[in-house]
């Protein structure tokens, strides 16, 4: 069960979809904030060289002295890499564009798929007393994303409610299967969350129906509505939960957090 401040190892969830602009970063930040609001201790690992999660949580590029790059490839103490955010219980390992070269540097490394796995299981991690780690993946199925899937217990997939949404999913599922067959047999699918849902739009409704017909229980009950407050929040370096606590977007991410927490209670029972 996901007890606040539990002494057990944190649950690691990779937020992945090789398509850009589907809501990975938005979901990482706001699900992270909602879990933190519920009392869990959450760490976000920004694994995208674009560093949008870092910016969205107020870690300016000048303040990113140590980053995910160092976590993977250098010997920098963890407490120098992890940064606080404006939210209680929510910390982040930021990323910069340096991370894009990591992909190439990793290639020649014998442990290339396991670097994040090992980094997140280093002894110093336990001092952070984390309950959950969310990894914001880049929009590709690169070695970085593979590192996230090897490190994680599960993959959470944001699916944008638009016409070609389901098409890219088979490629993603194939990668998950490959990771299971090689490095991480226990990797699960946390769930698929529909993002940017527009209730008045027929296409949105059709995508949801297709997703639920084809993917069944894998699809979270919670849908994230298209909500302007969600898109405004990052420019104030806040989650939507702090920026506008009563907005539809904030409420949806709280619902998603409850679903995630329920799942783990069930899994542990
Ligand atoms: P990804 O990380 O998958 O590339 P983002 O999370 O950056 O995707 O989202 C892409 C864009 O869509 C961003 O500009 C973001 O603000 C916007 N967006 C994401 N979710 C919502 C939502 N629920 N309502 C409105 N805009 C959203
Ligand atoms: Mg992103």
Image: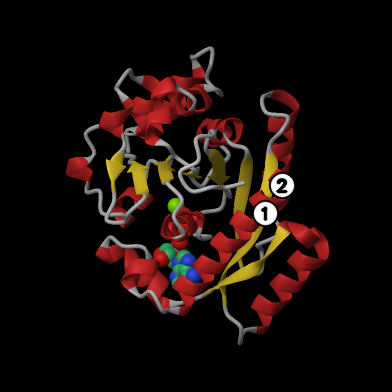
For this view, does 168 lie left or right of residue 28?
A: right
How much space separates mark 2 and mark 1, taking CA atoms? 6 Å
Place residue 229 in its image quadrant: bottom left
Residue at the farthest top position: 110
- Ligand 1 is found in which quarter of the picture? bottom left
Residue at position x 73%, y 49% in the image = 170
Q: Farthest left residue?
A: 62
Would you say 164 lies left or right of 241 here?
Answer: right
Label 1, secondary structure: give it: helix
- Whether residue 250 is visible here, answered yes or no, is yes
Question: Measured along the vertical axis of the image, is residue 220 above or below residue 99?
Answer: below
Whether the residue under disc 1 has CB within 8 Å of ligand 1: no
CB-based contact (under 8 Å), mark 2 and mark 1: yes
Residue 140 at x, y = what percent? Answer: 54, 43
Residue 3 horizontal/vertical position (percent): 54, 47
**Residue 266 image offset from top left, x and y in percent:** 71, 52
Residue at 38% x, 21% y: name it.
Answer: 73
Q: What mark, if any, has residue 263 been given in the picture?
A: 1
The dot on residue 245 is none
Q: Please, which colouring scheme is shown?
A: secondary structure
Residue 228 drawn at (x, y percent): 41, 77
Q: Secondary structure at mark 2?
A: helix
Determine the residue positioned at 47% across, 29% down.
Answer: 120
Disc 1: CA contacts within 10 A as few (<14), some (14-19) or many (>=20): some
Q: Is residue 154 left or right of residue 137?
A: right
Q: Is residue 77 above or below residue 88?
A: above
- Disc number at residue 267? 2
In screen coordinates, is 114 left or right of 30? Answer: right
Q: Nearer the viewer, residue 255 or 28?
A: 255
Residue 137 seen: no
């Amino acid at each position: 069960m996901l007890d606040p401040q539990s002494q057990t190892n944190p649950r690691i969830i990779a937020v992945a979809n090789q398509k850009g602009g589907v809501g990975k970063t938005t979901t990482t930040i706001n699900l992270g904030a909602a879990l933190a609001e519920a009392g869990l201790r959450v760490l976000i690992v920004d694994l995208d060289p674009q560093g949008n999660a870092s910016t969205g949580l107020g870690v300016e590029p000048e303040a990113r002295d140590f980053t995910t790059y160092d976590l993977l490839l250098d010997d920098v103490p963890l407490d120098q890499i992890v940064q606080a955010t404006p939210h209680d219980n929510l910390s982040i390992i930021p990323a910069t564009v340096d991370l894009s070269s990591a992909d190439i540097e990793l290639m020649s490394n014998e442990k290339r798929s396991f670097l994040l796995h090992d980094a997140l299981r280093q002894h110093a991690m336990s001092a952070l007393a984390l309950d959950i780690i969310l990894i914001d993946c880049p929009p590709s199925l690169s070695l970085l994303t593979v590192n996230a899937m090897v490190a994680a217990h599960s993959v959470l997939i944001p699916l944008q409610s638009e016409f070609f949404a389901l098409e890219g999913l088979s490629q993603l599922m194939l990668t998950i299967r490959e990771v299971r067959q090689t490095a991480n047999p226990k990797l699960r699918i946390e769930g698929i969350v529909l993002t940017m849902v527009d209730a008045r739009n027929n296409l949105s409704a059709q995508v949801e129906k297709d997703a639920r017909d084809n993917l069944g229980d894998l699809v979270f009950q919670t849908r994230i509505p298209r909500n302007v407050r969600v898109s405004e929040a990052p420019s104030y370096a806040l989650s939507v939960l702090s920026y506008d606590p009563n907005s539809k977007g904030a409420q949806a991410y709280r619902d998603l957090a409850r679903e995630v927490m329920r799942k783990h209670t069930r899994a542990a029972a």
